[in-house]
Amino acid sequence: MPLDLNRYLRRNDAKACGYTLIEVLVAMVIFTAMLTLAGMALNQGLMQYHGLAEKGLNFWSYASNIWMDKNFNSTIDYYVHTKSDGWFPYFKGSQEGISYVSLSPFTGDLPVVVWVKNIAEAKGRSLVYYELPVYTKSYEEIERNDTFGDYKKGASFKILDAVEDIEINFYGYDVQERKSRWTNTFNGNRMKTIPSLIKISYRSAGKKNNLTFNINVNSRAKGGYETLYPQ
């Protein structure tokens, strides 16, 4: 029977398209090594962060009001992206707490994600500050850190302890309503901006007290991300 050369070449080409076992094993080794190196780099970064945080905590524990004022003043308009909302500055505020990105006074102005949590305890309510290095976290990664309590792995500090009736309000520009106003919730994905003032009210020893902090950065220049980086 004469040999069909074209059929023979097609059959051999099809066989050559696959991967050998050795190629697959080499690819797996390279991929595993990359994951290991990435994990080592992340752990090393966290170790350096913890070392700086321990030194900073000793000082700032004696100056909590100055520390919080500096932290809010250093808030960054850190833009994140979701499919539903596009680009927006990360900021979440409610009566349960606040989350934003700032420069940490603990660690010599390292960029961090901050969670300020309104927590019920045996002696009353506490307002507790937590932070983690932001690196290049996406919105989804920050949300996972919040959902699974990973924020507790970083530095923390009690802003208020054993108080009552903590209330948090935010003053900022509402893009949809085209006016500035006070509100008890503030989300960057809806407002497309971050608040300019934060007021924390509470009762201690029967007296009502207020803490007011301002945020200096509110850049509109990054609003063009939708055009520059469409996703």
Image (cartoon, rainbow, N blue to C red):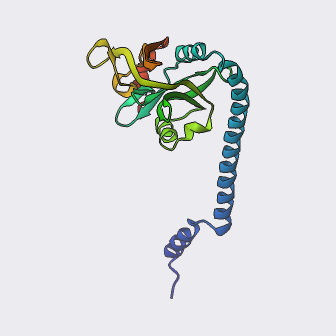
At which x and y percent is residue 164?
44, 25
Quarter occupied by residue 69 = top right
Residue 41 in view here: yes
Front in this rendered view, residue 106 or 229: 106
For residue 55, side relative to residue 117 (left or right): right
- The structure residue drawn at horizontal position 47% and vertical position 42%, both measured from the top left corner, is 147
Front in this rendered view, residue 229 or 111: 111
At which x and y percent is residue 215?
48, 13
Front in this rendered view, residue 143 or 200: 200
Q: For the C terminus, which image quadrant?
A: top left
Residue 220 in view here: no
At which x and y percent is residue 37?
70, 46
At which x and y percent is residue 113?
55, 29
* Numbered marks: total: 0
- The structure residue drawn at horizontal position 57% and vertical position 26%, both measured from the top left corner, is 158
Q: Residue furthest front?
A: 206
Considering only vertical position in the picture, is 127 above or below 150? above
Q: Residue furthest bottom?
A: 1
Considering only vertical position in the picture, is 180 above or below 92? above
- The structure residue drawn at horizontal position 68% and vertical position 24%, both measured from the top left corner, is 57
Quarter occupied by residue 22 = bottom right
Considering only vertical position in the picture, is 93 above or below 154? above
- The structure residue drawn at horizontal position 69% and vertical position 31%, both measured from the top left corner, is 49
